[in-house]
Amino acid sequence: MHASPVTAKTAWSTFFILWVLASLALASCAAPTPAPATPVATVTPSATQRPVPTATPIAVRTARSIYPTAQLTPIRATQAPLTGITLPTDVKTLLLIGTDSLTPFPGRSDAIVLAFYHPRLGRVSFLSIPPDTFLNIPGYTMQRLNVAYAVGGFNMLADALEYNFGVRPDDYALFHLDDFVYFIDDLGGLELTVVERMPSICSDIQPERALLNGDQVMCYLRYRDKMNELNRNLRQQEVLRLVIQRMVHGGTLARLPDLFALYSESIETSLTLPKILSYVPFMLRLGDANHVGYFQVKKPALVTWQIPDGLKPTVFLLDQTSLVKQVQAAIDFALIPEPNSELIVTLEYELTVSPTPTATGTATATPTITQTPTATQSFTPTVSATVTPSRTVTGTITQSVTVTPTVTLTP
C-alpha cells in the first residue's frame, strides 16, 4: 500500500499571513499624521485611505502540462488536456475501481467512480465515468478508459483521468469481482427495488423489491442494455448509497479493523487502516443524505462513435465544453456547507455502544507454564508424574518434576 497526496496549503497559508501582516505594517507607516484640529485644516479620511478587507484566496491545484508520450500510434487525433477545472486543495479525491476479473488479476475496469470529499465540511460527491469512454491514455495510446489500469496500473489510470477530466486522484481502491461479492454477503445482502427485467446474465433477478445476495448485486451493477450507460451508472450509485448507509448505521464502522484485515490482501488500495479510522467522524456525517451527492458524465459531454475496424464497436468520445461543467458541478457540491442533523448524534451513539474488538477475548496456550507455590497445586497429579526424591521442592517448582503429555492442566 502507498499513499501520495501532496499539498502546498501550509506553505501558502504561512506566506499569505506574512503578506497580510507586512501589508498592514506598511499601511500604518504610510498613513499621514493628522494635523492639529482647526476650522480650515480638518480633513476627513476618505474610504480609499482605509484598509479594505479582502477575502482569503482559495488554494487550488495547478494544471499539469507534460504527460508521457504515446507508445502506439492513435487511430484518431487526440484532444488537448482538459483545462478550466477548479479543484481546491481542501477537496480530496478518491478513485473507486471495480474490475471484471477475480483476485488477483486486474482485468478491465467495469466501474470507475471519482469521489470528491471535504473532510471539514463533511460533504462528498460521486462522479461516475463510463468505462467505454474512448480517450487519450498518456504513455499508451487512444483507447477505452477501462484498459488503463490493466496496462499501466494506478499511475496510468490517474494520468488518463488528469489528462481528460482535469482531476488526478489522491487515493484509490480497486475491488475484484469476488471481493465485492463476499463483501455484500458479509453485510447480509442489500435490499433493492428492481424496476426492469435483466435478461441473459441476470435472469434470476425479478422486477420487485427484494433482498439480493452478493452475486445478484454484482449482476445488477454490471448489466447494461446496449449503450445505456446512464442507467447502469444510476444503479451503481444506488448500490453505493445503500452500502454507505449500511456501514454508518448500527455501529457497523466498529468492524472496520476486522473488515480491513479480511480484505487487505485482495483489495488493491493506497489507503491504510490508520488513515481510514481517522475519517470515521467524517463518514458518520455521510449518514445524512444531504451530505452526499451523485453525478454522472453523460450527454452532451458523451458523444457516441464507432471504432473503424471490422466489428465497429461503439464507444464514447468527450465533448470538453460540456464536460468541464459536469466535473465542476461535482466538485462544487463538496464545497457547500451543510448543517448536521440530529441523525448524526444517533449514529455517533450507535457507534459508541457497539462492541469493540479487544485482544483479551480468547485465551491462548503458550509453551511456558508459570506455577506459583500454593497449598493447592495447579496441576492434577497422576501416576505418570515422577518425583525424584533427591531433590527438595522449594518456593518454585524445579526441573525435578517431570510432567508427561498426559498431565491435565486445570484453568
Image: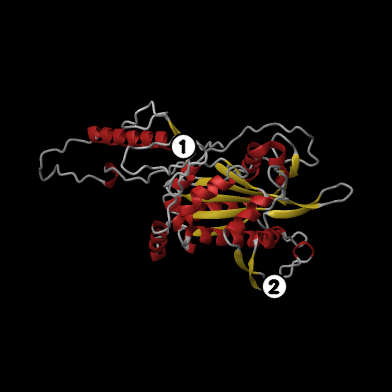
Q: Nearer the viewer, residue 279 or 61?
A: 279
Residue 210 position, x and y percent, is: 64, 71
Residue designated by label 1: 385
Q: Is 259 displayed left or right of 81 in the figure?
A: left
Q: Element type at marker 2?
A: loop
Neighbour class for label 2 at 10 Å: few (<14), some, many (≥20)? few
Q: Is 311 displayed left or right of 20 in the figure?
A: right
Up-down: is 398 above or below 44? above
Disc number at residue 207?
2
Neighbour class for label 1 at 10 Å: few (<14), some, many (≥20)? some
- What kind of residue is marked 1? Ala
Q: Earlier in the sequence, mark 1 or mark 2?
A: 2
Labelled pair 1, 2 in contact (Cβ < 8 Å)? no
Up-down: is 373 above or below 53? above
Residue 214 position, x and y percent, is: 65, 59
Q: Nearer the viewer, residue 228 or 17?
A: 228
